[in-house]
Amino acid sequence: MVVEKEERQIYKYRYFAAFLYALIFISSFQLFQILLANPTMEDHGRLLPVKMKAIKTSDHEDELQKIILDANKNDDPISISGMQHSQGGQTLYPNGILLDMKNYDKILELDREKKLITVQSGATWADIQSYINPHGLALKVSQSQNIFTVGGSLSVNVHGRDIRNTSLIETVESFRLLNAEGNIMHVSRQENPELFKLVIGGYGLFGVILDITLQLTDDELYQIRTTSLAYDEYSSYFTTNVLQDDAVKMHLARISVAPESFLTEMYTTDYYMTEDQTQLKLHSILKRESLIAIPKFFLGLSPFRLCGVQIELCGAQIDFGGTQIELCGAQIDFGGTQIGLCGAHIGLCGTQTFVAINVYNPGTLSSIPSGKPVGNAHLTPASSSR
Ligand SMILES: Cc1cc2nc3c(=O)[nH]c(=O)nc-3n(C[C@H](O)[C@H](O)[C@H](O)COP(=O)(O)OP(=O)(O)OC[C@H]3O[C@@H](n4cnc5c(N)ncnc54)[C@H](O)[C@@H]3O)c2cc1C
């Protein structure tokens, strides 16, 4: 009798659990439908979620044209997106159509002799690097990461670390633009030259960039030299040691944000040609970043609150009972001992040491900064510091 009663009880729990599961499943499906009908978009900065009317994408030029024409007919504003790493969310129009260009990402043509490549605007720098690396070619200008789309990079006219090819516009031969009327125009320094200057750095305001022809350069092997100096020594350092030295190809300077040396001390990193370029082959294998999922998960928690303890990553702080940990550009403070991350300094018992956070592995694609030949440039570790 007792066993029978217990069994009935267990069945009751099982039915209840099955009912609960079905309820959650059906409501999640409903919720998904509601979310689809009311898409909210935000960029990776996550500062400004914006409700959109619809999100559209295509890998075909004529479909993109149709999206523009339909939006025109319905008087819908259009926002364009690549990898959405622009921070602030200001490029999204509320209740507009978001045109996601990530699927329009083919590599169309490589001219090895002229060192020119034509790609669709949703292709990323990483896509291009994988394609051109076997040909001994590299990008001239790109950001310090290779995750961005070419269209998104052109639209903000990015800079890299190359001090001679200063911004991306200098390496653009031509592109095709789909304008607000649905027409496709060829744009270069000779054809529609006014648009050439407006669209590059135009934040998508002048139309959709379809495909782009970019100049490439030969892959080269660089070494890194890191130097720390006072801010008022920098100007003469830059003129003499960087501009007047033909071997220096890329350059980076960061000024201290630590309280004791705030804006007075700095460090510089020069990337100069390795004398023995025959070693290039040894370092020319591209490596991908591994272990992305775990940091991505934790960064995704930002900002996240737990039992009154606030955890905010990227520019903010973790506060455990008066002990503060600040990540990205700030400092870790344990009772007066400060450790600064990302360009700040480590200060232990009154002694300060600058840390070059940019540690490069020879041939590690993900760690390689932008500039000439960005991404595909292969670097050997820092040689000296002052
Ligand atoms: C970690 C990090 C490092 C960075 N480093 C650098 C750096 O070293 N140098 C530098 O200059 N910048 C740097 N940036 C800024 C970055 O270059 C820009 O945010 C860039 O626009 C990101 O590209 P995206 O593909 O994410 O573009 P999105 O953010 O998606 O778009 C950027 C702009 O381009 C427009 N757009 C996108 N695709 C098209 C298209 N096909 N046609 C027309 N318009 C389009 C969008 O409407 C928007 O206005 C960095 C950003 C981050 C997050």
Image (tube, helix red, strand yellow):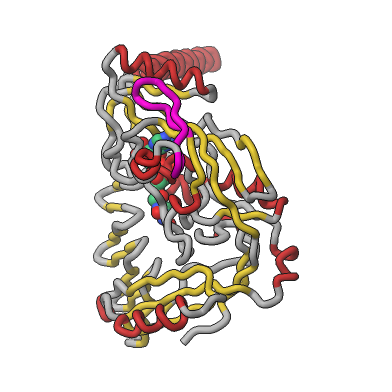
Q: Would residue 307 be found to the left or right of residue 4 on screen?
A: left
Please tell me whether residue 15 is drawn above or below residue 130 in the rendered image.
above
In x, y percent, where is residue 304? Answer: 32, 46
Which residue occupies the foreground of this view, 22 or 249? 249
In x, y percent, where is residue 222? Answer: 60, 70
What segment carries the magenta color? 176-190
In x, y percent, where is residue 195? Answer: 36, 38
Please tell me whether residue 154 is drawn above or below residue 349 in the rendered image.
above
Q: Quadrant of residue 322?
A: bottom left
Report the residue at 39% width, 41% height from top.
193
Report the residue at 39% width, 23% height from top.
55
| In magenta stretch: residue 177 | yes
Can residue 29 be seen in the rendering of this structure? yes
Can residue 5 be seen in the rendering of this structure? no
Report the residue at 65% width, 54% height from top.
137
In x, y percent, where is residue 12? Answer: 46, 14
Which residue occupies the foreground of this view, 280 or 349? 280
Q: Residue furthest front?
A: 190
Report the residue at 31% width, 17% height from top.
72
Q: Quadrant of ligand 1?
A: top left
